[in-house]
Image: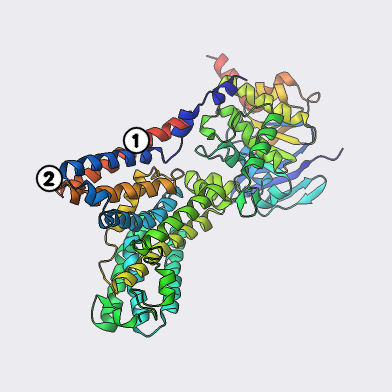
Amino acid sequence: MIPSIEFRGVSKFFGNIIALKDISFKVFKGEITALLGDNGAGKSTLIKLLSGVHIPSEGEILLSGEPVNFKSPRQAVSAGIGTVYQDLALQPLMSVTRNFFLGREITKGLFLNMPLMNTITKKEMAKLGIDVADPTQPIGTMSGGQRQTLAIARAIYFGANVLILDEPTSALGQKQQLEVLRTIKKVKELGDIAIIFITHNDMHAKLLGDRFAFLNRGKVLAEGSRDEIDMNNLRPLMAGGAELEKLETEFSGR
Amino acid sequence: MASDERIRDIGLIRRSISRPELGSVFGLIIIVITFMTLTSISGTFGAMWLNPIGIQAWVELAAFVGILAIGASLLMIAGEFDLSMGANIALAGHSFAIFVLFGVPIELAIILTFIELAFLGFIIGVIVVRTGLPSFIVTLAFWFASRGFAVFLSQTFFNQSRLSVKANLKPPPGGGEDPTLIDNIFAFDKAFGVPFDAEVYYFIILVFIVAFITNRTPYGNWIYASGGDPVAARAVGVPVARVKISLFMISTSLACLLGILTVMTSGASDPKAGDFRELHAIAAAVIGGCALTGGYGSVVGAVLGALIFAIASRGINFVPFIDNNLFRVMLGMLILGSALLNQFLRDRIVKG
């Protein structure tokens, strides 16, 4: 099977700073690739390479086997890469429907086709398990988890076949985290979308991940499918293996 | 789902609370009742509310301030400000008068003045968008510059600061006050046999058009999004910079309309025209529920705000036992009270 996205020896330098060095990993459709790494591991640089904000300094990114060279976020979006950022890019005072279609409104002549947009919003949200009773309500009335779902549903509706989720659970309470995990699972069940799930929560990664990639200090420490990776070893890998061991000896020597 | 019940239990009352105009609807009712009571006590009820001249007084003021408030509220929803509106009225009036005095046909002078003012709005917008300076500062600069430039031009070419164009406006063939056919179209005074100034008709038409645009077009959506969270708006493809520039152009064009109408009705351009009107328009927008932080408000609210302002402003003249200066105190309290009420209502929406 051809991977939806493949990184082949991708590096990114900012002047003398090496943000990412020789990154290689694969993402397949209908699968969740959990991308784990601590703060400063290079996760956000990696997202920006994928979403067209940055251009790789070395190596290549392949989209369904074809090398791509995004020059702008717009190009990445039209190539089917949808990014759901942590801040979600939503307008709290605007309605659910207006947020869903913001920037890509459906019109009837000059005017907004509100009934159609309301129907689509309800339908798309229902696909991910959220029943929106009244899509004309401001999203300020929705929970954090529901807003996350709205941002995901929007990305999918507008043609994302690679969905990048940037720490979707990190800013939420326990109950809402589960709600979002359930949403992500629903997206996977749609079958034709490759999901890159960026997180530093190894529990969530373990729950959902089909494949795993571990980033540490700009490098991929380990990469592979569920059976190739020692699941119990997730946490040390995330914190950067050797470093944690060092810390352990330090503490035990107390 | 549990969260579903929470959405469903929002009833009609909660729903209407989430309209930005709500505060100004209350305000208008209170102001009307207050002044109806006060005028009844003073025995001037008929003079203010029934006599055509009395009605004219506050309706025309509401229209004048209201036209500016349309621009002010659109900009505020998009998170911007235009302090130069009042000064641009004088600039437009003077530019128009100068064109006419130089022998440019009135029709062409109108078009040229609109182009000039729209271009000024474009410049203001580009400066704001490109430099990232607060529009408060940028338009404060033009608050000085526009009026200054207008008077400079008239002093240079005609050696006077007030420009009379009465002699240049030819009376229409059929008689009457309005000079030419195009003026009748443009300044349709008495067009419907009602003795209101042209502002009133333009105001009513503009309110409908703009309210429709803000609520029912993608552009209207983008205005709200540009003020609510510009970064988020850009991320989903809203052309925030272009939206803001276009709104500054709308704002200067509305000032242009008022400038030209003022010259048309009075036959002269006064360098003091529109003085302080920008603040009245902003007051109307605030009373009408616009948030200074952007992303929230409505043009209809601003229009109600302009009505409140005008009724309070003119009404005080019909109530002799209250000192005129107290009006400013009252207006100040009104703005403060409205802002507080609107903030409260807005918080209710976000917190659900």
Residue at image position (77%, 25%) is A229
Crowdedness of circle 2 by 10 Å Cα count: few (<14), some, many (20+)?
A: few
Mark 2 vs 1, N-terminal side: 2
- Which residue is found at the position 72% from the left and 45% from the top? A10
Q: Is residue A236 visible?
A: no
| Front residue (pair A23, B316) | B316
Q: Nearer the viewer, mark 2 or mark 1?
A: 2
Front residue of this view, candidates A230 and B87: B87
Q: Which residue is mark 1?
A: B341
Q: Please say if the residues under marks 2 and 1 sit with CB atoms less than 8 Å apart.
A: no
Instruction: Give left or right: position of A43 versus A67.
Output: left
Q: Chain of mark 1?
A: B
**Which residue is labeled 2 in the image?**
B321
Answer yes or no: is residue A198 visible: yes
Query: In screen coordinates, is B263 left or right of B78?
Result: left
Give SS at disc 1: helix
Q: Amino acid at mark 1?
A: Leu
**Against A175, is A21 above or below?**
below
Mark 2 residue type: Phe
Q: Chain of mark 2?
A: B
Residue furthest out toward the bottom: B103
Is residue A245 shown above or below B88? above
